[in-house]
Image (cartoon, grey):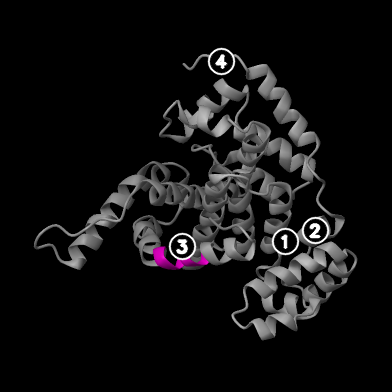
Amino acid sequence: MIEAGEGELHHGEAIRHKIATLPLLPSVVSRLLLLNPDDDNFLDEVHHLARQDPTFSFRLIQYAARTCRSSAMADKFSLRHAIARLGSRQIASIVASLSLTDAFEPQNESDRNLWLHSVEVAVAARKLVEAMPDLQLDAELIYLGALLHDIGRFVIFQAIPEGPARIDEHQWITPLALLEAESAICGTDHVTVGRQACEHWEIPAPIRDIVDNHHNYDLPVETVAERLLCTRVGVIQIADFYSVYLMNHAAGEPVEGESEEALAEREREALSHALEPILAGNGSVLPVKYRSLVARILQQQGDAIMAESKRILDALGITE
């Protein structure tokens, strides 16, 4: 058991103040998150909402322009061009990302690493959903839940600037150890803080449920709704562990006489071992054929996940 730190009460008050003073999501953003991207008039609705908020419109155009390789083309972007370029399937996640950067602009390396982790988890989770169509999960809902899963850590990092370093002093290596270290230093943990931030922002319930349970590794599966939540959370937990694995595991070098295929197999075994706790927990609801393929899918998509994460961070203006 970790003893409570001297500044626990002070830190708890700082966190409560940070949540209370978070800028509310622009009404256009809140309304957009409730739209159905499968509706025929979805993009027209997005355009109508975006026009009501000039600042938001400018950010959307700016984001789209940053994803364009041709500067000449980017200079000609209108709001409608930007929305069409970003597409109906990704617009909600981009909107959430822009709102998150407004509230939690990175100030230091810890902030940037947290942004990298959040985007990496979101991209990896979406790749998993796309590779496992039998799950019938909404890829963009999973992306949003993954992007926001550590929103409580964003709050803690900004409310307590020295928090990341003091929490890391406890040398946590498991999610439960992280929660315990946070409680000792801050008087609360990032799951609790994340729930409060989502309530403050009036985030839709399916995403709030993901944030609230992303460190719950033994969810019930008796009802259809429980099984759906467990599957959503399980996929995001796999992506979460994968991102942590990437941050802590340097790419291996072949030993003398080892083929590239043998090296790839050794790396896959290491990744499989890192994912075992999830695949034995909520990940066990995945069909057997996918449980045995998860590490291979992530390994095959590894370069694409890192490249897409970098493109998103660059478009958000978050650079090293």
Q: Residue furthest right?
A: 52
Q: Of the residues shown, which amino acid type is indicated by label 2?
A: Val
Q: Quadrant of residue 45?
A: bottom right
In this view of the protein, which residue sits in the foreground, 17 or 151? 17
Which mark is first along the chain, 4 or 1?
A: 4
Say if mark 1 contacts mark 2, CB within 8 Å. yes
Q: Of the residues shown, which amino acid type is indicated by label 3?
A: Met
Which mark is first along the chain, 2 or 1?
A: 2
- The residue that disc 1 covers is 95
In this view of the protein, which residue sits in the foreground, 73 or 20? 73
In this view of the protein, which residue sits in the foreground, 205 or 157? 157
Q: Nearer the viewer, mark 2 or mark 4?
A: 4
Q: Residue at x 34, y 62 (%)?
A: 296
Q: Which residues are magenta?
A: 302-308
Q: Tag 4's secondary structure?
A: loop
Q: Residue at x 25, y 62 (%)?
A: 264
- The residue that disc 3 covers is 306
Q: Residue at x 67, y 49 (%)?
A: 105
Q: Tag 1's secondary structure?
A: helix
- The residue that disc 4 covers is 4
